Amino acid sequence: MKIRKVFIRVLFVLLAVVAAVLVVRAILNFTEGRRLTRTLAGLKGQGTPLTVKELIPPCPESENGAMLWKAAEELYAFEGEDSKLITKVYQAFVRNEVISPEEWSALTRVIEKNRRMLDLIPEVAAKPRFQYGDRELSFSERRMPDAIKVLRSMRLLGFEAFMTAEKGDIRASLDRLRAGLRFAPKIAEESSLISYLVALASEKQCLLFLNKSLSGREAGEEILVPLLNDLNERQIERWKALLKTSTRGERILFMEIGLLTDAQSWATSSWLKGEAQKLYYWLIRPLIKRDVNQNLPIYAGLEANAALPYFRTRDYWKIHRDRMRDLPWYAVAAKLAIPDMEATFMKTATFDALVRTARAGLACRIYKGRTGQYPESLEALVPDLLNEVPVDPFTGKPLVYRRDGEGFIVYSLGSNEKDDGGRSTYMITQLVMEKDDDWSWKEDR
């Protein structure tokens, strides 16, 4: 009898605990659900897209460059040794190291194997829109352009342009690179962070090849002025807008992970299986709603800062890092789904710096063509060639410019905000590089 009484008491205690958990769970689910509903309604009222379909507008096939790019991907012809070759040659290229004639010959063969694919890039760039994935699907379900194929294709395009310049055909070289500069932003129209980063890396590669292809070679105003017009402030603002759109895409992905597609897989422990897994997920669902509701405002801050020069966002990133570090234990969705956007903003700033130094470099070339010498300062380029002296996105001060023998160098100080003499490794390994972090345009004569 005594054992039976103990058993009954334990059973009642367990039932009371279960009942209390269910009551608490019900109250939390109701209150957190209402709060999240109000938050989403407020965002919708502000015109913030909450689904892929709302974020990405319809695109007629006749205007869609992705249709051509899908065909280009099918023509991609890389073998194992080809991949190693292009990586090796590219790394040597950006470091200004010697590339052997045998490596150049091998690279030429890879370019010819991919000729049909490369010839489609200008056609893709000429299309007004680019929509690769189905906008009716969620981000986790949509297909995206193959990042490896995009990056390798753009490197091949750059090398082809450089070798064309080496043969003396500057116009054809720059036409190829201008097509690449128009193509890269198309990839970012997919509105996901990964597509944005791939597109940004491709655009930066084009700017590097532009500098290498043009520097030290004769080119008249009929070539330089259209290029200068391409690299205008609107180009920088366009990439800021693409960054804002990709941030909105990340917000949608965060909500999908937290509320729709993958929540159960990341929210449950690996040792839970079957019905136990479903029960655990059901119990913590209110906390997932709280996580999503509390951390959606992070994206509003990211959007607002996407429109600012990088040097004006530094205080924001300290606040952002503190907030991410202090997330509560149940904020699993936020910890896993909110990406390291600070690195993305820094990479955008390096692109900004490359565009501004390229504009200044091209304007100096045009100025010399008109006057017979490079300017003594960048102020001499205003207002005939530039609207204003280009500002370093890392410091908020004018770009560094100085005459150097018969040539000149113009550069941004980069993330370390130190004058490294215009040297750059072009290989970002951390948020603040220790040295050789300048982003430059150089002419020797």
Image (cartoon, rainbow, N blue to C red):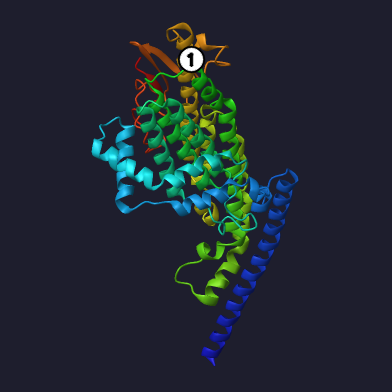
Number of marks: 1
Decide: is 259 above or below 278.
above
Q: Is residue 106 visible?
A: yes
| Residue 12: percent from left, percent from top | 60, 80
Q: Which residue is mark 1?
A: 366
Work out whether 54 lies above or below 412: below
Closest to the observer: 412 or 103? 103
Residue 367, above or below 319: above
Figure quadrant of residue 46: top right
Q: Residue at x 63, y 54 (%)?
A: 135
Q: Position of residue 4 (x, y in %)?
A: 55, 90
Decide which of 345, 411 is in the foreground and name it. Answer: 411
- Which residue is depicted at the point 40% across and 13% down? 402
Q: Amino acid at mark 1?
A: Ile
Q: Residue furthest bottom?
A: 1
For disc 1, the neighbor class at 10 Å (few under 14, some 14 to 19, many from 20) is many
Q: Is residue 326 visible?
A: no
The image quadrant where one finds the C terminus is top left
Task: Measuring from the top left, give residue 47's x and y in whole percent.
Answer: 72, 44
Tell me: residue 395, above or below residue 52.
above
Q: Quadrant of the N terminus?
A: bottom right
| Residue at 45% over, 34% down | 206
* Residue 368 percent across, percent down from the top left: 45, 11
The outermost residue toward the right is 45
Residue 243 image-quadrant placement = top right
Q: Secondary structure at mark 1?
A: helix
Q: Nearer the viewer, residue 256 or 350?
A: 350
